[in-house]
Amino acid sequence: MADLTITGKGLSNWITSRGRTVAGPYTSHQNAVAALRGVEARQRPVTIRRCLCCSEPFPSTGPGHRLCPPCRRDA
């Protein structure tokens, strides 16, 4: 996972990784922190898991993601 940081101050805050802007600008540090959590969540590693409904393997982003897309759509 990339080392993400919040840079800036006041009304200008950005999320950066290795000196490159990843997201922003944000009007407050609190907004940048909330966005940082979202960016980190999207960067979670993918694991191949079996669907709890049909047992087919699918790429899962975490323990809360246990239904494959077809089963999730039909649920």
Image: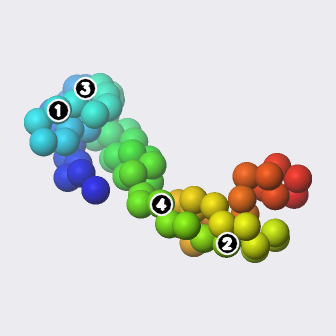
According to the picture, the residue beneath numbered tag 4 turns out to be 46
Q: Tag 4 or tag 1, which sits nearer the N-term?
A: 1
Crowding around mark 1 (Cα neighbors within 10 Å: few <14, some 14 to 19, many 20+) is: few
* Closer to us: 71 or 4: 71
According to the picture, the residue beneath numbered tag 1 turns out to be 20
The amino acid pointed to by label 2 is: Arg
Residue 30 visible in the shown view = no
* Closer to us: 12 or 5: 5
The amino acid pointed to by label 4 is: Val
Q: CA distance from mark 3 to mark 1?
A: 19 Å
Q: CA distance from mark 1 to mark 4?
A: 24 Å
Crowding around mark 3 (Cα neighbors within 10 Å: few <14, some 14 to 19, many 20+) is: few
Secondary structure beneath dot 1 equals strand
Q: Tag 2 or tag 1, which sits nearer the N-term?
A: 1
According to the picture, the residue beneath numbered tag 3 turns out to be 11
Crowding around mark 4 (Cα neighbors within 10 Å: few <14, some 14 to 19, many 20+) is: few
**62 left or right of 11?**
right
Q: Tag 3 or tag 2, which sits nearer the N-term?
A: 3
Q: Nearer the viewer, mark 2 or mark 3?
A: 2
According to the picture, the residue beneath numbered tag 2 turns out to be 50
